[in-house]
Image (cartoon, rainbow, N blue to C red):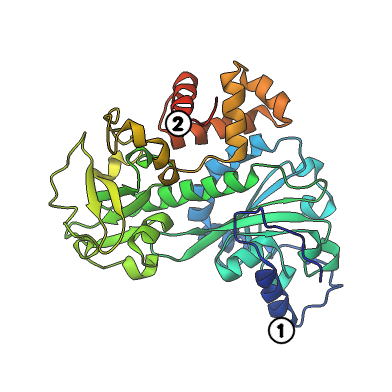
Amino acid sequence: MRTAERSDFPMGASFERVSASWHRCRGMQLDHDLDPPLEPVTDSQLRTLLQRDARLAAVARQELEMMSRAVADTGHVLVVIDDQGYIAAVAGDVHHAGDTLRRLRRGVDLSEASFGTTAPGTALADRQPILVRRSDHFLTQLRQLECLAAPIFAPGGDVLGVLGVCSDQRPLLPGLVEMVQSAVLRMERQLLRELGSPKILRLHPHPYGLGGISEGLIAVGKDGEILGTNTIGAQLLGITQEGAVGRSLDGFFEVSPLRLRPISNGMATLRINEGLSVAATLVEAADLERRAVRVGRLPEGPGGAGSRRSDLRLLDRLTRREIDVLHHLDAGLSNLEIARAMFVSEDAVKYHLKNIYAKLAVGSRLQAIATARELKLIR
């Protein structure tokens, strides 16, 4: 098996993981020359699946609509599979895709047991994001595909499903990794809101990260118990999502987040036991989508504006494509002009801008340019 070089890919795909998937496929007696089973389940079974996957489909709907606009006319197909591997939703540019992707529909089984090594099926099997290039696919007939996928975790740590992007007409578009990761984080955010917890603790190593896509979120019950977290929240606590549920929130911090008196515009600094100091704010669950109050301009001197550039390592990292968009913004280009300059769709530019605004904690193009200059991201 020849595995493509992927040292520049940040989602953790590796020779070892693809090899492990191939080993599982052989253990399930799959044949390399097997025709991909593209027939969906029966109508009766499909109705049952659609009812069972209604929550997943509802959470994914808005993200699929936005991503579909970004990949318009590119032949890229978006797919959401449930926790058993069955397709719950298909979107994207199906019209310009090849025969295999055009035939994907709800109720088709994309699990490893059925399709062998693919990004959606393998991400479901090992609960990690992955890129699967052409020759990495176990089934010979799928080796014209390139696909990437990331699991969608419920607040209690269960894998609710997987979001994937596939192409069989051209290489995967630049920026899709960030697009998939951001979409999954927003879906996890929505799932956390649905817990109905009275309070949510927002955490980030840097105050400017609060309210952004990569903040940690912890749903807190009325007695201070943890009802669930997003993946980033669990990572900051140094525990799995499953292990956090039911534990007392106070047990993870040197000072209780429920008793700490907030400072600096509603924010406080908390130290996780033997871990990071993080910016934090405790909000009503209904207020989660309101942007966190940002700290004012950092004062001059130690830890102030003079050290802000070194604090960048604590901010959400801007991708190369987002930096490119910032440079075009600084040159005064419109969204359409940026899209033409970068050979992407105008919706893809809007998607990058949305992520830039969240990462820089700004609300306009002018603010993005000013902040980027201040942080030495553009000259």
Report the disc number at residue 351.
none
Q: Looking at the image, can residue 128 be seen?
A: yes
Label 1 crowd (10 A; few <14 / some 14-19 / many >=20): few
The picture places residue 297, in percent across and down from the top left corner, at 30, 27
Q: Nearer the viewer, residue 298 or 199?
A: 298
* N-terminal-most mark, 2 or 1: 1
Q: Image quadrant of residue 254?
A: bottom left
Q: How many marks?
A: 2
Label 2 crowd (10 A; few <14 / some 14-19 / many >=20): some
Lateral position of residue 192 relative to residue 302, left or right: right
> Helix, strand or loop at disc 1?
helix
Give the residue number, with chain letter if any, for mark 1. Answer: 27
Q: In the image, is residue 53 above or below residue 28?
A: above
Give the residue number, with chain letter if any, for mark 2. Answer: 375
Q: Quadrant of the N terminus?
A: bottom right
Lateral position of residue 106 relative to residue 264, left or right: right
Q: Residue at x 44, y 52 (%)?
A: 188
- Is the residue under label 1 in contact with that under label 2 (CB below 8 Å)? no
Q: Which circle, 2 or 1, is nearer the viewer?
A: 2
How many angstroms separate mark 2 from mark 1 (CA)? 52 Å
Q: In the image, is residue 340 above or below residue 319?
A: above
The picture places residue 37, in percent across and down from the top left corner, at 78, 67
Q: Residue at x 16, y 60 (%)?
A: 223
| Amino acid identity at mark 2 | Leu
Q: Quadrant of the C terminus?
A: top right
The picture places residue 349, in percent across and down from the top left corner, at 62, 30
